[in-house]
Image (cartoon, rainbow, N blue to C red):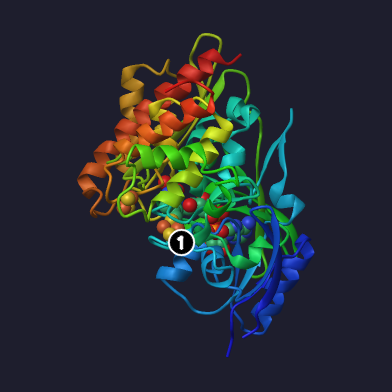
Amino acid sequence: MQSFAYAAPETVEQVIAVLQEHSQAGKPAQILAGGTDLLVQIRSVDGSARTIVDVKKLPETNRLEIGASEIYVGAAIPGAVLTANTDLKARLPGLVEAIDLIGSTQIQGRASLGGNLCNASPAGDTIPALIANAGRCQIAGPAGTRELPVEEFVTGVGTNALGEGELLLGICFTPPAARTSDAYLRFIPRTEMDIAVAGAGVSVTLDEKGICTAARVSICAVAPTVLLVPAAADALIGTSLDDEALAAAGAACTAASSPISDKRGTAEYRRKVVAVLCKRAAGIAAERARGSH
Amino acid sequence: MSRTHVTTTVNGERREFLCEPQQSLLDVLRDELQLTGTKEGCATGDCGACSVMLDDRLVCSCLVLGVEAEAKSIDTIEGIATDEGLHPLQEKFLEHAALQCGVCTPGFIVAAKALLDQNPDPDEQQIRYWLAGNLCRCTGYDKIIRAVQDAAQTMRGEAS
Ligand SMILES: Cc1cc2nc3c(=O)[nH]c(=O)nc-3n(C[C@H](O)[C@H](O)[C@H](O)COP(=O)(O)OP(=O)(O)OC[C@H]3O[C@@H](n4cnc5c(N)ncnc54)[C@H](O)[C@@H]3O)c2cc1C
Ligand code: FES
Ligand code: FES
């Protein structure tokens, strides 16, 4: 009988080898980062034995680089480290506020960006912020490394594009251009410790006159996967982000939604709230973009 | 079943234990190391009763594997009082009657100490947000917040 095992390789090659050995032998193996999703799931959803492959010892998953031509955030870095980084916060404030919303101080001590993304919850808070910032997944596997836009990474509720033997190393971003900034907002019925009823991440670029020249809008908890909403971005581009443009972007988010009703909110409510969140997040992103030179 | 041998530092002392790969650090502390001050309220990361410091970072020990403690340093509620006496937080929790059944208390004290170690003068809102992952079913939180504020004042060397 298969029993639980634990491996904590120190190189990417070793992780891939362990994952491949297991899949060839038909034995289950699963990657562990901060464990705040995985260990809860093992305890309350599926307690079947598997090999747990810890990816926190890899240099690639711990690297945080905020360079002039590229920003790289290692997949396994705990939220507490990322939110304390003032450089990252200055460059990608919306992403950092999304990370900061995850769980409690204790959860922040472990929860990673890679775990939030790979777990692929429809309500994963960082995913809209990653998509709004055009994040690119850096994936390593038996065939080498590949890159995938975040919006193509999540394939369904709890599923992602990682193939056999693959792991996420980190996420890359092109540093925001001048007068570009982002914001993420979610709605929860409490002030702390809850899961998004709906959420919206927005990034905008303005020209010298304050006209929006580029935008990306992403929404969560209103469809099986986090969505990129090009129609909402189109409603913003070419405008001064006046009320009318913001309302049109909100309406595009409502139109793109296909939410469920659950104890946190009805489908109708979610469709409405997502529009409000999009408008407000776009407003905050624009405010920040005006302040950044 | 193969048990893994783990060497770690708990409250400044080198400790060794054997554990199953899926066993939580919380279970290891309580069942293998007999450090039962750290409590289990939920085992799913929601209540904070199991709060410990792992390499100087506040975490839920129920969401850490025992095997992950290898070569790490862990600080638990048992390490907070010194030979000289109770920590100011412990004193103030008693003084303010900030506990009833006491199951949440070790977690609150470990978490509050982590806050005061990095911010000696937090305002009430900062304290409430920092402790949002610690649940108490008895006190209604108010006395806990007052105790933390008072302890912070004492630790800053100001008279209360
Ligand atoms: C009390 C509590 C509150 C929470 N609140 C929130 C919240 O407000 N918002 C929110 O979005 N989430 C929340 N979460 C969920 C969770 O904390 C986050 O999703 C977190 O970011 C997961 O990161 P992790 O490092 O703990 O992932 P893990 O649990 O280690 O992993 C999650 C999944 O991703 C896979 N994985 C992890 N890293 C990699 C990698 N590098 N390559 C391939 N696969 C990988 C794992 O195999 C697993 O399937 C909460 C959880 C708890 C317990
Ligand atoms: S027992 Fe760990 S958070 Fe409740
Ligand atoms: S004193 Fe009983 S749970 Fe807090």
Camera-side residue: B129 or B103?
B103
The residue at 35%/49% (across/down) is B135
Task: Decide if residue A89 is on the left or right side of residue B60.
Answer: right
Q: How many marks?
A: 1
The residue at 53%/13% (across/down) is A291
Give the residue furthest to the bottom.
A1
**Residue A105 position (above or below residue B38):** above
> Which quadrant of the structure image shows residue A22?
bottom right
Q: Position of residue B66 (x, y in %)?
A: 60, 66
Give the residue furthest to the top.
A209
Task: Decide if residue A68 is on the left or right side of residue A176.
Answer: right
Camera-side residue: A163 or A41?
A41
The residue at 56%/23% (across/down) is A180
The local secondary structure at tag 1 comes to: loop
Q: Amino acid at mark 1?
A: Gly
The residue at 73%/67% (across/down) is A16
Task: Decide if residue A123 is on the left or right side of residue A117.
Answer: left
Camera-side residue: B148 or A103?
B148
Label 1, residues with CA under 10 Å away: few <14, some 14-19, many ≥20: some
Q: Position of residue B92 (x, y in %)?
A: 41, 37
Q: Is residue A129 at all visible to an observer of this figure?
A: no
**Mark 1 — residue?**
A158
**Residue B103 position (above or below residue A81):** below
